[in-house]
Image: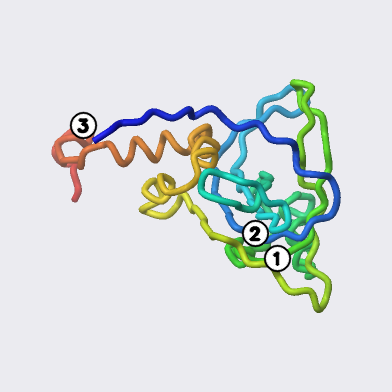
Amino acid sequence: MSLTAKSTATVKRDPITAGVKTAVCCGIVDLGEQESVWEGKVKSADKVMFIWELPKEVIETEDGPRPRTISKQYTNSLHEKAGLRKLLQNWRGIPFPAGNDVEFDLLEMLGKGCLISIIHAAGKDGETYARVGDVIGLPEGMDAPKATHLFSLNLDDPDALDTLELLPGWVQDRVKAGKTYPILLARRERPDWAPEDVPMDSEEDAVF
């Protein structure tokens, strides 16, 4: 028996080339409540991340060739001015009814093909990164690409933490960086409560 240690350093790759790419949504992940800084102020909001495979952008890995992926986070809201609403309307080609009282099952987009514009932008470290620009539906007659794998996460599911452990490490890191993850973790690790654990002023307050 042997025990071999391997480097876990992130492999640095060139950014995905800019331009319009054929893509397929391979992952939709509930990130829970996340903090962000906007105009110097820290704000919290529920976020969701879409992940797309780019079938024609292939890289070599230890497990063989695989398509590259790109992701983008959105505030989980369908408000008329929300970026997620714009994404879904452009992608589906179907406008939502006017107003903010709108619901939509995001998982309907899992496995759906699209065209993504990839743009290059400079990060705070001066490096160039590929970002998701516009996302639109495929032209009529164009076959949708197939994802090599599909995954999703809903933090409201009872088995959400078990599902999380099956996702790619970088996706797990995004979820764990949020404010919802430690709450779910505490719930799972907390032992079953007993009646004597419930604070009350008198025996008459205990109703079960």
Helix, strand or loop at mark 2: strand
Q: Left or right? Give the position of 138 relative to 73.
A: right
Label 3 is placed on what type of residue?
Answer: Asp
Q: What's the residue at 49%, 39% (across, down)?
A: 169
Which disc number belongs to residue 25? 2
Q: Tell me whether the residue at label 1 lies in contact with that at label 2, contact meaning CB atoms closer than 8 angstroms.
A: yes
Image location (x, y in percent) of residue 134: 82, 53
Q: Secondary structure at mark 1?
A: strand
Residue at point 55% right, 50% down? 64
The furthest residue to the right? 19
Position of 114 compared to 33: left or right?
Answer: right
The answer to whether mark 3 and mark 1 are in CB contact below 8 A is no
The reply to whether discs 3 and 2 touch (Cβ–Cβ < 8 Å) is no
x and y percent of residue 18 in the render? 84, 45
How many angstroms separate mark 3 from mark 2 (CA)?
54 Å
Q: Amino acid at mark 2?
A: Cys
Q: Quadrant of residue 187?
A: top left
Give x and y (percent) for residue 10. 57, 30
Q: Residue at x 40, y 45 (%)?
A: 165
- Quarter of the image with the N terminus is top left
Please tell me whether mark 3 or mark 2 is closer to you in this view: 2
